[in-house]
Image (tube, rainbow, N blue to C red):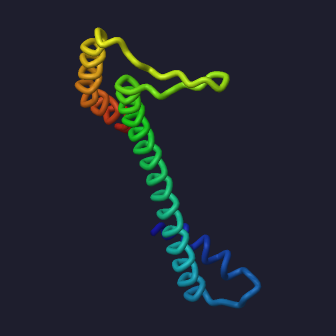
Amino acid sequence: MNNELIERVANTIRHDKFDRDWCTALEVAQAVLAELAGELRDAELSQIYRAERDRQEAFANNLLEALTAIHMLAAPSDVEVNGKIYSFKPDPAIYLEAWREMSKRIREIPKAIDEARGSMIVR
């Protein structure tokens, strides 16, 4: 630990309301600075963990969006308008086209994962 900083803290402690000798003030200064260093280290780790949590959350949200897009293509939800429910019932002629589009989106998932991971790299 920086001796000059320890001496500054020791001088402050020695000149407070309590009557302390120099050795006691140095010991108290070292103890106070060690405790503050621990708190600072904990605060830095907490900040790092929050940033990592936010990156992981963004990654998970990107994957969820990709999977939701595939699900919506495969089976769109019913829609209610003015109390009337509308359901998606495709013409059998478009099944092959929808199946190909769904297959294409599924094949794109690994690329989306790699892109999401690449955007998480801190430089």
The residue lying at 71 percent from left, 80 percent from top is 15
Q: Quadrant of residue 105?
A: top left
Does 63 sit left or right of 83 as displayed? left
Does 7 sit left or right of 50 as displayed? right
All told, the count of numbered labels is 0
Q: Is residue 1 above or below residue 109?
A: below
Point out residue 123 in the picture as x, y percentages from the top left corner.
37, 36
Point out residue 32 in the picture as x, y percentages from the top left corner.
57, 76
The residue lying at 40 percent from left, 31 percent from top is 68
Relative depth, front residue between 8 and 59: 59
Residue farthest toward the right in the current orientation of the protein: 17
Q: Quadrant of residue 16?
A: bottom right
The residue lying at 66 percent from left, 89 percent from top is 20
Relative depth, front residue between 43 and 56: 56
Q: Is residue 109 above or below residue 12?
A: above
Quadrant, the N terminus: bottom left
Relative depth, front residue between 1 and 72: 72
